[in-house]
Image (cartoon, grey):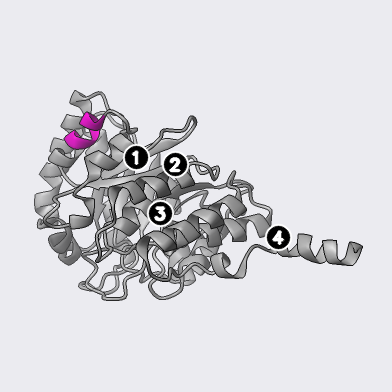
Amino acid sequence: MPSIPSKVQINEEGPREGFQIEKNPIPTARKIELIDSLSRTGLNRIQIVSFVNPKAVPGMADAEEVVEGFHKAPGISYVGLWLNDKGLKRAIDSGRLEVKGSVSLCASEPFLMRNQNRTKEENIPLQHKTMEMFKAHQVAVRRGAVMAAFGCNFAGDIPVETVLDTVEQAVNIAAAHDFTLDTMMLADTMAWATPASIKRVVGAVQDRHPGLEVTLHLHDTRGMGIANAYAGLEMGVKTFDSAVGGLGGCPFAGHAGAAGNVCTEDLVFMCDEMGIETGVDLEALLESARLAEDIVGHPLPGSVMRGGSLRALRDKVGAARAA
């Protein structure tokens, strides 16, 4: 088993992951307010919008306005999400985002049909077409992604061999266009993962593709998000997607209680207490989490947001003893 890393990369997805699913419309100015707040926390990669059909995801209808309005801070990569060529073109045309290519596949065909209205077979030529579009715009492709890698509400358990076959397919699609993947993101899209399955699937991918760095996109619908992140750390995973306050959830997951990514401040807290470097100021991040809760107007599931950091409590106890 690999050793626990001394430093991790945290990719913040709250502004996109959260605002895409909120039932009540979020004013554009408040979306920008959260992005700007997150920019002051030490996070160095923030996903801020989805370039998707507003009829399918009304919460992202103002994507261009958000991209135009936020304040870019130096040293931070601001990115968007897209599902097709039209969305990619919108991201490129925005002129304010970092655009990196990826091969995006899904281990569950029923979920792929719900999410993108296509079969696995239909998705392959579209991925090849997307690779050609990346090349035409001189966008490098070094990352693959497998959705529903740990289970699916419509297909059930996903066999490890299916995940391995999907990873292999992504590698081959990239290679057909002279791209070499060095990263593979495994997404627990519908929160089926447990620490045991994290270790089983991640370990299998690492064994089959030792040259690929595995990253994790974890959801917390069943309260396993932080436990699964810990299991990933034990497997040597160095990069995690997360959402401030635990914002979000997938609108196509078919689960009324679908939760967002593992909570950013809870993940940062755990890493801090383990001596793992994140580069993130936890206290500043907690301010962003409280702001996120104010913006959406309902309680968010983050735990450290309520309990506070142990660092602050230690300082308080120490001051009391000194007095």
Which residue position is annotated with label 1?
79
**For the residues carrying marks 4 and 2, which lies nearer the camera in this image?**
4
Q: Quadrant of residue 24?
A: bottom left
Which residue position is annotated with label 4?
312
**For the residues carrying marks 3 and 4, which lies nearer the camera in this image?**
4
> Is residue 130 covered in magenta?
no
Spot occupied by residue 279 in the image (x, y as percentages of width and height): 59, 43
Residue nearest the observer in this picture, 265 or 230: 265
Q: Main secondary structure of the magenta part?
A: helix
* Residue at disc 2, secondary structure: strand
Q: Residues within 10 Å of mark 2 (few under 14, many from 20)?
A: many
Which residue position is annotated with label 2?
45
First reached walking from the N terminus: tag 3 or tag 4: 3
Which residue position is annotated with label 3?
205
Q: Which segment did they paint magenta?
A: 89-94
Do the numbered discs 2 and 3 sit on residues whose CB atoms are within 8 Å?
Answer: no
